[in-house]
Amino acid sequence: MARFVNVAIGQLGPIAREETRTAVVARLTSLMRQAHATGCDLIVYPELALTTFFPRWYMADQREIDTYFEREMPGPETRPLFDLARELSMGFCLGYAELAVEDGIVHRYNTSILVDKAGAIVAKYRKVHLPGHAEHEPWRKFQHLEKRYFEPGVRFGVTDAFGGVIGMAICNDRRWPETYRVMGLQGVEMVLIGYNTPVHNPLAPEHDHLSTFHNRIVMQAGAYQNGTWVIGVAKAGIEEGVDHIGGSCIIAPSGEIVAACATKGDEIALARCDLDLCNSYKQTIFNFDLHRQPRAYGPIVEQKGQTLMADGSKVAPRR
Ligand code: CDT
């Protein structure tokens, strides 16, 4: 029997700095109701979907920074989302800033959760690849302080849910082939990815006109090379003066885009995803058991950066 998951992209337009969690959750529940009305099982929301993208500002006061973090999930403001999921029998994937106290130590992560149709959290993922910088760099038009505000997660896991094998990644993770391959090796059939991507990259403005191309090429390659569905979901539009790409889309294991948003505002786009479409890729061209050559891949995990050239040089990082 075919295994279908009806998936909705739950793209968000901008969230203002002053917008309350309650107002944002009302936008999320509106998208969930729309997705449910079209027969969806699962809606995927963006990265840090409860607030504005706060790493664009340098803040020295940790109490101010912590106003963007969730100490509990669900909390009083997010509970309506879980209640609606249960009422409608809908799953969702939500990105948010997580403040966790573990063994008495405070940790802050850029996190996504997967919630099943009963409203239960069945998986949590903490962003591994944190882009940007850790110190205030006032020469930039806007900051990207993820390296200051979060600590990196340490694993890409997968979960049996919605009748298949589901994984999560967050924004910058989607640019790295290792993200998909580590989940591909665990048999992933659908990767859920929320993002906030400014059009302008202060370190490489010559890439700005390619930002939507790069968004698609990495997710399409990740899907095809691992025989998996990929759901990419933006927080889009001009948020607090910073233009963010849209380009939310659903990518089949063929690497083809089968659904996409048309705006940079709150919008759903849908696809009926047959998880068994993964099989022909996993069984043939990307049959890992038959064709991978891990003996040749050692440097992937043994070293972090590029090896030095014969003359002792390597490409210098831009700062
Ligand atoms: N949120 C996020 O990870 N954004 C990054 C911006 C990179 S430029 C510092 C991205 O990879 O889309």
Image: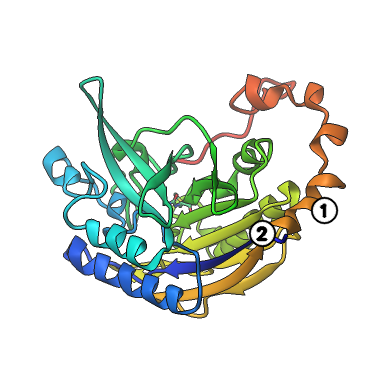
State whether residue 213 appears in this view: no
The kind of secondary structure element at disc 1 is: helix
| Residue 133 drawn above or below residue 264 | above
Q: Nearer the viewer, residue 259 or 2?
A: 2
Asked which colour scheme the image uses, the reply is rainbow
Q: Quadrant of the C terminus?
A: top left
Q: Where's residue 277, x and y in %?
A: 75, 59
Corner quadrant of residue 271: bottom right
Q: Where's residue 247, x and y in %?
A: 54, 69
Q: Horizontal placement of 47 versus 240: left or right? A: right
Corner quadrant of residue 195: bottom left
The kind of secondary structure element at disc 2 is: loop
Which of the numbered marks, if any, corresponds to residue 244? none
| Residue 81 drawn above or below residue 156 | below
Who's the residue at 26% across and 65% down the image? Answer: 25
Who's the residue at 44% across and 41% down the image? Answer: 127
Q: Nearer the viewer, residue 223 or 93?
A: 93
Q: Where's residue 305, x and y in %?
A: 60, 27
Q: How many marks?
A: 2
Tell me the distance, in whole angstroms, between the alpha carbons under discs 1 and 2.
14 Å
Q: Horizontal placement of 157 versus 123: left or right? A: right
Please report contact status of discs 1 and 2: CB closer than 8 Å, yes or no.
no
First reached walking from the N terminus: tag 1 or tag 2: 2
| Residue 250 drawn above or below residue 311 | below
Crowding near the residue tagged with mark 1, few <14, some 14–19, many ≥20 C-alpha atoms within 10 Å: some
Q: Nearer the viewer, residue 202 or 104?
A: 104
Q: Residue furthest front?
A: 1
Residue marked by disc 2 = 3
Who's the residue at 67% across and 27% down the image? Answer: 300
Q: Amino acid at mark 2?
A: Arg
Q: Amino acid at mark 1?
A: Ser
Residue marked by disc 1 = 280
